């Protein structure tokens, strides 16, 4: 699908942003370089990766956090490397130890050559996104390994889980291009004066935002925003079954076990303790747990793709929710409607 049509929206929720906000993320470099800035979803000031001092020619950037598996759904993982120049510098990268990369199941979303060897390449400078399975990572860390040549740069690295809405939005949606950075005034003589504070997202170093190609400029002006309405969502799609960190249920007999036994472990064969919830606020696969809670409403940014079947480079945006609250409107038994306002930020 071309143009800017909206299909089934996808949210790439940056775990780095969320863990930074609660003080649970560390970013380290094997070369002793200060790389802390790349854990934030802001690629406007790329850093140059230091040349490896070790004999194997490999430079590591590790994201360390405790209880990684508590936050990551294994089969819906993603890595996004924004503001890079890997193609022109002939730099290769891997998201795990190349000798232990089985089970990662990397799948290209855009600009990532995952065929052939353990180390990956990008066909173009700009940005790279691919999905992966976090089940093959260890419990305490994840990272990127480089075999750099020349002067490879990175604006930021976003990793975490993506969430696809259960279905596409209603037809009564709005796609707006704002020019809020332009201020006009009319003089006493009737002349119109205009001052542009900003007209488009900030460049990612020498690269325009969301561009592919060497030193490609961004000529698209304006700020995008989306007003979306969704109807007839099941409560299990948008609400957490268990909004606590603990898996403990209300009683030893379990909570609601008779009406919805799939919510509760019946024994150790389900991977947990009998009578306890199977999920919690950290690993629940509902919209609130995966998206709203991890972005703290409109506080933290995320990568938005309005149509998960369209991987063209102009289909991505760094956004925030622009809502003071989220309202679930019940329209039938255990069935709800909701509205979202999503606004591009930089």
Image: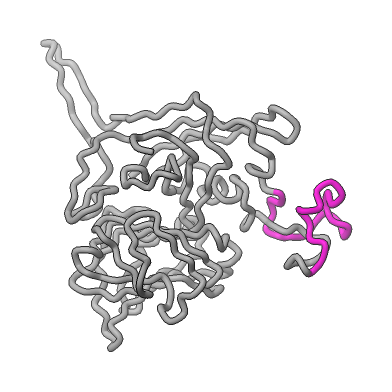
Residue 144 vs 206, above or below: the answer is below
Query: Which residue sits at x=73%, y=60%?
Result: 247
201 lies left or right of 75? left
Image location (x, y in percent) of residue 180 = 30, 30
Residue 190 vs 113, above or below: the answer is above
Q: Is residue 228 magenta?
A: no
Query: Which residue sits at x=33%, y=30%?
Result: 177
Quadrant hosting residue 292: top right
Range of residues picked out in magenta: 241-268
Image location (x, y in percent) of residue 309 = 44, 45
Give the total number of marks visible in the rendering: 0
Residue 78 vs 7, above or below: the answer is below
135 lies left or right of 307? right
241 lies left or right of 188? right
Q: Residue furthest front?
A: 116
Looking at this view, is 205 or 212 the one in front? 212
Image location (x, y in percent) of residue 86 = 25, 65
Looking at this view, is 317 or 311 the one in front? 311
Query: Which residue sits at x=29%, y=48%?
Result: 210
Characterize the magenta stretch by its predominant secondary structure. Answer: loop
Residue 317 vs 154, above or below: the answer is above
102 lies left or right of 260? left
Q: Residue furthest bottom?
A: 55
Quadrant hosting residue 83: bottom left
Query: Which quarter of the figure is the C terminus placed in?
Result: top left
Q: Is residue 245 magenta?
A: yes
Query: Which residue sits at x=18%, y=16%?
Result: 186
Query: Which quarter of the figure is the N terminus placed in?
Result: top left
- What colour scheme has been applied to the protein in the rendered image? one colour
Image location (x, y in percent) of residue 144 = 38, 71
Quadrant hosting residue 213: bottom left
């Amino acid at each position: 699908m071309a143009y800017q049509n909206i299909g089934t929206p996808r949210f790439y929720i940056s775990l780095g942003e969320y863990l930074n906000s609660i003080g649970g993320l560390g970013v380290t470099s094997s070369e002793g370089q200060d790389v802390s800035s790349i854990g934030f979803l802001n690629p406007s000031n790329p850093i140059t990766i230091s040349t490896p001092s070790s004999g194997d020619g490999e430079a590591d950037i590790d994201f360390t956090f405790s209880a990684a598996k508590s936050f990551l759904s294994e089969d819906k993982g993603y890595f996004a490397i924004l503001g890079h120049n890997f193609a022109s510098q002939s730099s290769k990268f891997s998201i795990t130890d190349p000798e232990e990369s089985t089970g990662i199941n990397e799948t290209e979303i855009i600009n990532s050559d995952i065929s052939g060897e353990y180390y990956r390449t990008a066909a173009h400078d700009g940005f790279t996104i691919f999905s992966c399975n976090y089940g093959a990572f260890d419990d305490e860390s994840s990272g990127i390994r480089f075999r750099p040549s020349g002067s490879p740069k990175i604006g930021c690295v976003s990793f975490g889980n993506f969430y696809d809405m259960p279905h596409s939005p209603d037809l009564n949606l709005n796609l707006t291009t704002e020019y809020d950075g332009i201020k006009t005034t009319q003089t006493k003589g009737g002349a119109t004066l205009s001052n542009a504070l900003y007209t488009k997202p900030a460049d990612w170093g020498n690269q325009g935002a969301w561009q592919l190609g060497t030193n490609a400029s961004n000529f698209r002006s304006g700020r995008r925003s989306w007003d979306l309405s969704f109807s007839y969502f099941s409560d299990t799609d948008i609400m957490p079954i268990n909004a606590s960190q603990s898996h403990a249920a209300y009683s030893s007999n379990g909570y609601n076990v008779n009406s919805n036994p799939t919510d509760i472990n019946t024994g150790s064969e389900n991977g947990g303790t009998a009578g306890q919830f199977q999920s919690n606020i950290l690993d629940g696969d509902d919209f609130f747990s995966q998206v709203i809670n991890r972005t703290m409403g409109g506080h933290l940014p995320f990568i938005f793709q309005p149509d998960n079947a369209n991987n063209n480079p102009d289909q991505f945006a760094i956004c925030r929710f622009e809502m003071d609250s989220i309202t679930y409107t019940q329209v039938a038994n255990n069935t709800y409607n909701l509205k979202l306002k999503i606004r591009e930020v930089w």
